[in-house]
Amino acid sequence: MTNKYCSVKPALNAGLRQVFIETYGCQMNVNDSEVVLSILQPHGYSLCNSIKEADLILINTCSIRDNAEQRIWGRLDIFRLEKKKRKGVVVGILGCMAERLKEDLLNHTAVDIVAGPDSYRELPQLIASLTGGGKQINTILSQEETYADISPVRMDKNGVSSYISIMRGCNNMCTYCVVPYVRGAERSRDPKSIVKEAEELFGNGYREVTLLGQNVDSYNWVNPENPTEKTDFARLLEMVALIDPKLRVRFSTSHPKDMGDSVLYTMAMYPNICKHVHLPVQSGSDAVLAKMNRKYTRESYLRRVAKIREVLPDCSISTDIITGFCGESEEDHLETLSIMREVGYYTAYMFQYSERPNTKAARHYPDDVPAEVKSRRLSEVIQVHGEISLASNQKDLGKVFEVLVEGYSKRSKAELTGRSSQNKVVVFPAGNHKVGDYVNVKIERCTPATLIGTEIIK
Ligand code: 5AD
Ligand code: SF4
């Protein structure tokens, strides 16, 4: 992971220990790594750029699909070699895979510490206890932990957009998903601490925050001192939007069964709440949705989409799709392709079903779609994705979007890149602009993934 916090060379750094943190999985995990760094810094750790410099190597892991876990086993073999070369290096495994596999990971020769997502406050203690010999593990899940009081040390690259975790855990119990088992029960973070974190980011030059939760629509904070005082997600969005009109607010992930109209009306009221909803559909077939325990139907999903379009005509919608879930027939698959076309997603994250041990699907439904059928269906989903994202971008030709600049384009320093409120990537000639500026760009060309245009002065 690259970072800007490791400017001090180890030789000048007497007394400081170097920690290297490698992060896999979702944005919430990236945010958790920032919380971990914040916990370790007062204990004399500073972040470094390479495992070769590190006294402590931490790997923050993901369990969502088997291939995510396989990559991490591969990394542990590399860390074992590093430990052989340099005595005293400590390796800790954090996050969802630590929670899922517990002692099985501790038994790996490279691993000294296993810490689940709710035990990061214990890390300094776990590290200190290693001096007595042996390995250390803490995978206790909590009903309360939200790390609300911890200011994450930002490791993001652009200094413009950042992420704030507003809740932890998940209560949904989708039958394919490991998250409720590895992240525990859902709990909401105190809104005052969220607003304070967003204000600090704005004060430090950030211009965009994304509020993160497994299901943001079920955010509900109840004041423990006064249980009649409650904050729901629509109110939280408003509180963050009111910090400053120049602070963009995004959020992810919305659940189609829970996304209420009040969130849509709040989005409509504040221009700085970005007009983008990530609304995972997973499948277009009612039979598959029921087996996944998604608690909505194709029809009720489409009604949600129609409501979004009615209240927010310029809102973009993205989604997640799983191909080859247990019992998925060819007709079910065709329904997924058709709902993609019907909604016209501007983008989608697309996966083959991967059976996760101990989930309801693993316990009750045979993983019976052959691997080659899963992958053929995934290619067809990807093909439709290419068509509909291009069509979505073509609709934007000639329109003007306010773009928040995030950096230079990959191709040239003469071009800047940023995103529109709809979360589409926009590239345009740099002129005198810099990272963090808002620029009005008229769209002239597009690819399936990018809008290309030039600045216009309104
Ligand atoms: N197999 C494949 N994809 C999965 N996802 C979650 N669990 C699985 C699984 N077992 C996908 C879903 C979810 C996204 C984060 O990952 O689409 O929305
Ligand atoms: Fe994030 Fe889910 Fe992976 Fe955990 S398992 S890191 S919550 S995507």
Image (tube, rainbow, N blue to C red):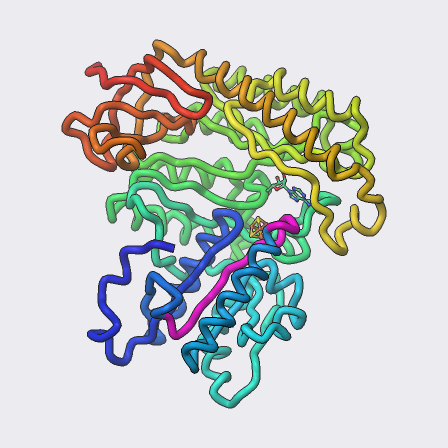
Q: Where's residue 431, x and y in %?
A: 16, 25
Instruction: Check if residue 34 falls in the magenta segment.
Output: no
Query: Which residue of the protein is positioned furthest toward the top in this rendering?
Result: 398
Q: Is residue 444 left or right of residue 131?
A: left
Above or below, 456 against 153 in this view is: above
Number of numbered discs overlaid on the protein picture: 0
Q: What residue sits 42% from the left and 60% below the top?
A: 35
Closer-to-camera residue (259/72): 72
Query: Which residue of the protein is positioned furthest toward the left in this rendering?
Result: 432
Q: Where's residue 294, x and y in %?
A: 72, 36
**Res. 270 in view:** no
**Res. 146 in view:** yes
Q: What residue sits 19% from the left and 16% below the top?
A: 457
Closer-to-camera residue (389/316): 389
Above or below, 193 against 211 in this view is: below
Which quadrant: the C terminus? top left
Q: What residue sits 22% from the left and 15% below the top?
A: 456
Q: Where's residue 111, x and y in %?
A: 55, 73
Closer-to-camera residue (252/23): 23
Which quadrant: the N terminus? bottom left
Q: Is residue 65 left or right of residue 219?
A: right
Q: Where's residue 107, x and y in %?
A: 64, 75
Above or below, 262 against 391 in this view is: below
Q: Which residues are magenta?
A: 54-67
Above or below, 337 against 113 in this view is: above
Closer-to-camera residue (346/48): 48
Q: Is residue 314 left or right of residue 196?
A: right
> Which image quadrant for residue 445?
top left
Q: What residue sits 27% from the left and 62% below the top?
A: 6
Query: Which residue of the protein is positioned furthest toward the bottom in this rendering?
Result: 132
